[in-house]
Amino acid sequence: VAGAELFAIALQGGITVTAITTDDDNNLYVAGTFDEMVHITDVEGADGDFEVLGAEGEYGAFLAKYDSNGNLLAVKSYQAILPLEEYFDETWLNGMPYYGSDPTVSISKIVADGSKVYAQFNYTGDVVVGDGLTLKAKYLFVWGMAYNEASNIAIVSFDTTLASSANV
């Protein structure tokens, strides 16, 4: 029956779901943000298989794939960081003060199309996606005296196992 519940999964902890979609094979893709330690579970819940993301003081975004029976097939997590080793010297960027806030990352949209899955990443700070792909943040020089973060958006494609990432 259309609209009938097929299964239930538990996303435990400080999780906010930000996007959800299905593909032609009825696989489910769920994206969201997490705050501190969370559990991403399948239909078996806490007694079955689950992935643990984050730790105390960590937050980021995740992308999970479930099959049509609610079995967890893949989970990827992402965190945004200030590229301190590259540009920053404590609170300075290119010799000028940095007045930005903590870096953030979220996924606001997922599209499954054939053998590809596309995710819209919204971020400040650099985000290591995988497969050699890092989303590099841009910064604004404001008031002629300091740097601040800019809002960044990227579309990333994955294969259906959530691997083989590429910036679109």
Image: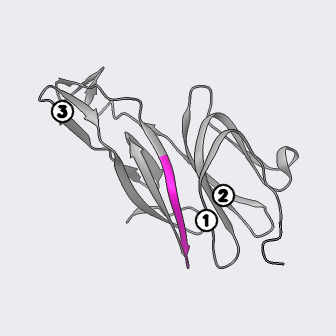
Other-residue count near label 1 (Cα within 10 Å), few / some / many at <14 / 14–19 / ≥20: some
Does the magenta-highlighted stretch encompass residue 150? Answer: no
**Distance of label 2 from label 1 (alpha carbons):** 7 Å
Across and down, in percent, residue 139 comes to 25, 39
Farthest top residue in view:
90
Three-letter residue code for mark 1: Thr
Other-residue count near label 2 (Cα within 10 Å), few / some / many at <14 / 14–19 / ≥20: some
Q: What stretch is highlighted in magenta?
A: 106-114
Across and down, in percent, residue 29 comes to 63, 62
Residue at image point 39% right, 50% down: 134
Q: Are marks 2 and 1 in contact (CB under 8 Å)?
A: yes
Three-letter residue code for mark 2: Ala
Question: Which is more N-terminal, label 1 or label 2?
Answer: 2
Question: Which is more N-terminal, label 2 or label 3?
Answer: 2
**Distance of label 3 from label 1 (alpha carbons):** 41 Å
Q: Mark 1 points at which residue?
A: 161
92 with respect to 52 (left or right): left
Does the magenta-highlighted stretch encompass residue 108? Answer: yes
Question: Which is more N-terminal, label 1 or label 3?
Answer: 3
Across and down, in percent, residue 148 comes to 27, 33
Q: Which of labels 3 and 2 is toward the front?
A: 3
**Distance of label 3 from label 2 (alpha carbons):** 41 Å
25 above or below 111?
below
14 with respect to 46 (left or right): left
Q: Do the residues labelled 3 and 2 touch (CB within 8 Å)?
A: no
69 with respect to 63 (left or right): right
34 above or below 95?
below
Q: Which of 121 and 92 is in front in this view?
A: 121
- Assign the N terminus to one quadrant of the image: bottom right
On residue 142, the disc is 3
Three-letter residue code for mark 3: Val
